[in-house]
């Protein structure tokens, strides 16, 4: 009985050692397989990473090429636009301002509103009736400094008598202009046509508004005429002016219901508005 028990112990020990060895062998084999699989996966990952890196470099190169092509296309578009619009467009004078109003407009030149010198008006010897926008940077050809031509040009003052009080001028223009001189600016636009419409503050449908203001002209007491122009409703002044020199004066233009003007819609004595429109 004792012998059988001992034999069982011995056999159990042998079988146990064999089982442990088999488990160790299986674990070792399993670790080897896992290690091999990890190495395989790492190799595949490195290969894919290299491929992705190569693709990223290729994409970057393509992006640089696309950027260069986009820049070239934009440049060609600008050249085409400039070619299509070369020799096109129109210009107008914005009386009373030194900047253009936007809407695709650009400054051609700035200057001073000018007209016929008043003593020539008084003597009945006035010449040009139109106002001029004299540039602020004149260039001279051959000249003399002797006043002997009989035609003189001077600046134009804001007057608007009898609306000369600060309160009146603030209501009309937003500020008191005193007797300061008026500036001007010539604006260029790509739109081919523009027109000044008296008696309106807005353009008709389909037209672009450049600016609006008041219809003005020179003093009516002189023997010669001046043109009607549209003075911006928020005018600027020429720096260091305002001395009431009375060499050339601007006045509002009013509607007169004496029988020939359609009243209504026009109202007797009312200052006329104006708007400059383009298309």
Image (cartoon, rainbow, N blue to C red):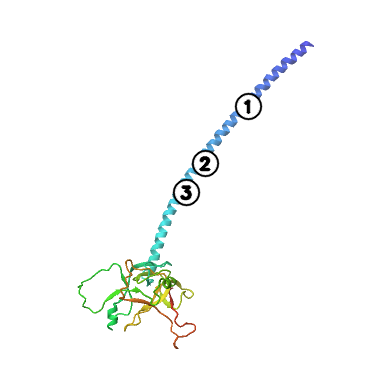
Specify the farthest residue to the top: 2
Residue beneath disc 1: 27
* Residue 135 located left or right of residue 190: left
Specify the farthest residue to the bottom: 259
Residue beneath disc 2: 48
Instruction: Work out whether residue 54 can be spotted.
Output: yes
Mark 2 or mark 1: name the one nearer the start of the chain. 1
Q: Is residue 117 above or below residue 14?
A: below
Do residues under tags 2 and 1 come within 8 Å of each other at their CB atoms?
no
Q: Which quarter shows the C terminus?
A: bottom left
Mark 1 or mark 3: name the one nearer the start of the chain. 1
Give the CA separation, mark 3 to mark 2: 16 Å
Q: Residue at x 45, y 48 (%)?
A: 60
Residue 118: image location, x then y, percent: 29, 78
Q: Residue at x 42, y 59 (%)?
A: 74
**Mark 2, residues whose alpha carbon is within 10 Å: few (<14), some, or many (≥20)?**
few
Q: Is residue 41 above or below residue 200?
A: above
User: Mark 1: which secondary structure?
Assistant: helix
In which image quadrant can residue 132 be found? bottom left
Residue beneath disc 3: 59
User: Mark 3: which secondary structure?
Assistant: helix
Q: Which quarter shows the N terminus?
A: top right
Residue 114: image location, x then y, percent: 31, 74
State which mark lies toward you, 3 or 2: 3
* Residue 3 located left or right of residue 23: right
Mark 3 or mark 2: name the one nearer the start of the chain. 2
Do residues under tags 1 and 3 come within 8 Å of each other at their CB atoms?
no
Q: Nearer the viewer, residue 244 or 43?
A: 244
State which mark lies toward you, 1 or 3: 3
* Residue 42 located left or right of residue 174: right
**Mark 1, residues whose alpha carbon is within 10 Å: few (<14), some, or many (≥20)?**
few
């Amino acid at each position: 009985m004792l012998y059988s028990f001992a034999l069982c112990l011995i056999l159990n020990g042998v079988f146990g050692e064999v089982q442990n060895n088999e488990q160790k062998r299986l674990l070792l084999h399993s670790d080897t397989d896992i290690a091999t699989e990890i190495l395989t996966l790492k190799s595949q990952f490195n290969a894919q990473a290299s491929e992705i890196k190569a693709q990223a470099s290729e994409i970057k190169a393509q992006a640089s090429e696309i950027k260069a092509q986009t820049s070239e296309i934009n440049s060609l578009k600008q050249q085409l636009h400039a070619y299509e619009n070369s020799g096109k467009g129109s210009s107008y004078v914005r009386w009373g301002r030194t900047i253009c109003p936007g809407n695709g407009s650009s400054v051609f030149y700035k200057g001073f509103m000018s007209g016929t010198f008043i003593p020539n008006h008084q003597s009945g010897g006035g010449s040009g009736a139109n106002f001029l926008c004299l540039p602020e940077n004149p260039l001279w050809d051959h000249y003399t400094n002797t006043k002997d031509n009989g035609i003189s040009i001077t600046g134009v003052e804001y007057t608007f008598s009898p609306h000369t009080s600060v309160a009146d001028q603030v209501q009309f223009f937003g500020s008191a202009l005193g007797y300061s001189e008026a500036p001007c600016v010539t604006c260029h636009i790509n739109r081919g046509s523009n027109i000044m419409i008296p008696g309106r503050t807005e353009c008709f449908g389909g037209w672009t508004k450049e600016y609006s203001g008041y219809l003005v002209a020179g003093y009516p007491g002189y023997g010669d005429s001046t043109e009607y122009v549209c003075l911006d409703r928020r005018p600027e002044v020429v720096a260091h002016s305002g001395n009431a020199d009375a060499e050339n004066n601007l006045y509002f233009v009013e509607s007169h219901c004496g029988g020939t003007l359609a009243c209504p819609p026009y109202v007797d004595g009312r200052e006329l508005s104006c708007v400059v429109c383009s298309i």
